[in-house]
Amino acid sequence: MISIVSMHLQQIPEPPKGKAGYVYDWLRGQIMSGQLLPGEALKQDAIAKQLGVSSTPVREALRQLGTEGLVTHAQHRGVTVSDLSKNDVEELYVLRAAMEGVAGRLAARRRSREDLQAMEKILVDSESLGFSSENGYEFARLSREFHDVIARAGSPNIIAPKIQQLWLAHPVPGTRSIWHVPEEARSLIVTHREVYEAIKAGNEFEAERLMKRHIEESGTAQISRQ
């Protein structure tokens, strides 16, 4: 027999997503897609009116985005989309190169068959895409997955979460991604294949060298687009 309590519980619908979460998702999507550009002012009242919410969830969403580094709260300027200087970008990629280089070395030592299968699938999907600027967003998504698989294969508890934090706090807006440049995309895919082969072969120091060089060269290319 179903109790009255059970019946009532079954009738309770899933709670709707909070308004702050809705505003957060929308703003983050706008920033990542390049619809909101680095340095652009974010007016709470205007956002609230556009999304049909009060200023409270907007304020909460902006606070969350601020903790992630996506927006900046500055006196006399209000809230703006964060923008990294060329020095900041250089430091970011130097840090990434060091961390992901080590992750690549450890992945060559610790990778499982499932890890290699996941990398191979991502590579095949990437290589099957046409090298055109229209596919830049998909290339970038697959690249993120490829790097994530390697980081988790090498150091799932220490390095991978730190790399994830860097990606979340300092994302590259879609409009600035070097994956939109066909010749850059072609070169990056070739390098991904080289990194994969080194990891598959268990060549630890070659995997580290290739990954480190890959990140450094990506940083140089990214700075040139600033």
Image (cartoon, helix red, strand yellow):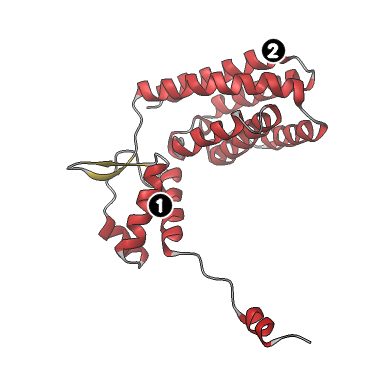
Secondary structure of the residue carrying tag 1 is helix
Image coordinates for residue 112, horizontal then vertical, percent? 80, 30
Please report the residue visible at 46 percent of the width from the left and 36 percent of the height from the top. 171
Quadrant of residue 97 in the image?
top right
Secondary structure of the residue carrying tag 2 is helix
Image coordinates for residue 212, horizontal then vertical, percent? 58, 17
Q: What numbered label is drawn on residue 27?
A: 1
What amino acid does circle 1 point to? Leu
Quadrant of residue 6 in the image?
bottom right
Please report the residue visible at 35 percent of the width from the left and 67 percent of the height from the top. 53
Q: Quadrant of the N terminus?
A: bottom right
Sequence-first disc among 2 and 1: 1
Distance between mark 2 and mark 1 Cα atoms: 40 Å
Q: What numbered label is drawn on residue 142?
A: none
Outermost residue, left direction?
Answer: 76
Please report the residue visible at 33 percent of the width from the left and 26 percent of the height from the top. 85
Q: What numbered label is drawn on residue 206?
A: 2
Image coordinates for residue 88, horizontal then vertical, percent? 38, 24
Please rate how many residues cluster around mark 2, counting C-alpha atoms within 10 Å: few if below 14, some from 14 to 19, many from 20. Answer: many
